[in-house]
Image (tube, coloured by chain):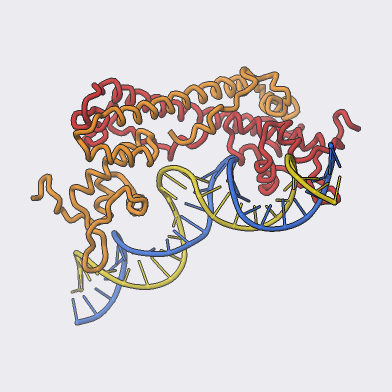
Chain colours: A red, B orange, C blue, D yellow
Amino acid sequence: MNASGRALGLSIGQLAKATGSKVQTIRYYEQLGLMPAPERSQGNQRIYGARHERRLAFIRHGRELGFPLDAIRQLLSLADQPDRPCAEADAIAQEQLAAVRSKIARLRALEDELERMVACCASGTIGDCHVIEVLADLSHQHCLTPDHRGQDSEFGDA
Amino acid sequence: MNASGRALGLSIGQLAKATGSKVQTIRYYEQLGLMPAPERSQGNQRIYGARHERRLAFIRHGRELGFPLDAIRQLLSLADQPDRPCAEADAIAQEQLAAVRSKIARLRALEDELERMVACCASGTIGDCHVIEVLADLSHQHCLTPDHRGQDSEFGDA
DNA sequence: GCTTGAACCTACAGCGACTGGAGGTTGCAC
DNA sequence: GTGCAACCTCCAGTCGCTGTAGGTTCAAGC
């Protein structure tokens, strides 16, 4: 019971290294209930097994893809019920894809505006600096889209 | 002294409406020192003039373009010194443009991964759900880029 | 003059997902 | 037995707001 079993005996530092996480992050996930509380050594230090490593890898993988922790929590609970339909998991992933696309769209608009802004900078003085002029312009006349404020709150993390 | 002068007598709520900000946000900017403390009425309520309106519009405009408040602080201080060279302002804008581009690149990679993820979902059960399978895969074999973790901390806000 | 309700005031907690530090204990190698 | 790295808990800070609690002021209507 070592290859895919549970006993493995990783310290939190070893688990962190194995999954590319930080020690604090692992404790943070435990605090949030995303990671189960592991056994402790006689000296009260956490001891992890393969099960924990898989779970943490799942979480990190989700985070790398930009899923919020709440979505990951749902995905984890779904992953534990192989017989349920996968429509729910699919919906979560679709939602994340939509969020990513909307952030891209917003950032591309910003990119356009910023490009125009810096392209016109002739390295003169602040007095005739296009960057400052655009920002100071109350009427947004220099802007491609007069309302470049995002409709969704902000493009958060991912 | 009304058209472009200072006296105008806006309450904080009127200023918020005029600039598309929220009342709390204006107070927050004042607390950070981005907005100067305005005069007060007899009843201790803030009274703003055209100068404040221009300054707040500048800040909001910068935020809409994703500049962090610290960058906006620098840009504001530059805007007050029209004789200085504009290289510094240009550099700040270039930096922001670079940040936006790097976020776009990261998000596009995520978009690709997520597309592949959901495209293969055949609406079966969790047991053979591609979404869950990819996330649970320790070896990242299903991933386009085995290291889709961002090199910069995260793609923050904008 | 009085009442009502909206808008204002200060101060502080919370969001998301960590990160870093203080101050103390344990584990392992030499 | 001695050092020091890694562990422990708890708490504050990041960024840019947003929301709430509990109280005061303003302007309009009667």
Q: Nearer the viewer, residue A77 or B2?
A: B2
Task: Give residue C30's quadrant in the image.
Answer: top right
Residue at the (31%, 41%) spot, across then down: B60
Residue B84 in view (yes/no): yes
Residue A133 in view (yes/no): no
x and y, in percent, of residue A95 in the image: 55, 32
- Count the marks: 0
Q: Which quarter shows the C terminus of chain B? A: top left
Residue A1 vs D11, above or below: the answer is above
x and y, in percent, of residue A29 in the image: 67, 43
Q: Is residue B32 left or right of residue A136?
A: right
Q: Nearer the viewer, residue B112 or A41?
A: A41
Residue at the (19%, 32%) spot, across then down: A127
x and y, in percent, of residue B97 in the image: 38, 26
Q: Is residue A71 left or right of residue B102?
A: right
Residue at the (70%, 37%) spot, across then down: A76
Residue B70 vs A125, above or below: the answer is below
Q: Nearer the viewer, residue B52 or A45?
A: A45
Q: Residue furthest right?
A: A1
Task: Give residue A20's quadrant in the image.
Answer: top right
Residue at the (30%, 31%) spot, across then down: B89
x and y, in percent, of residue A148 in the image: 33, 32
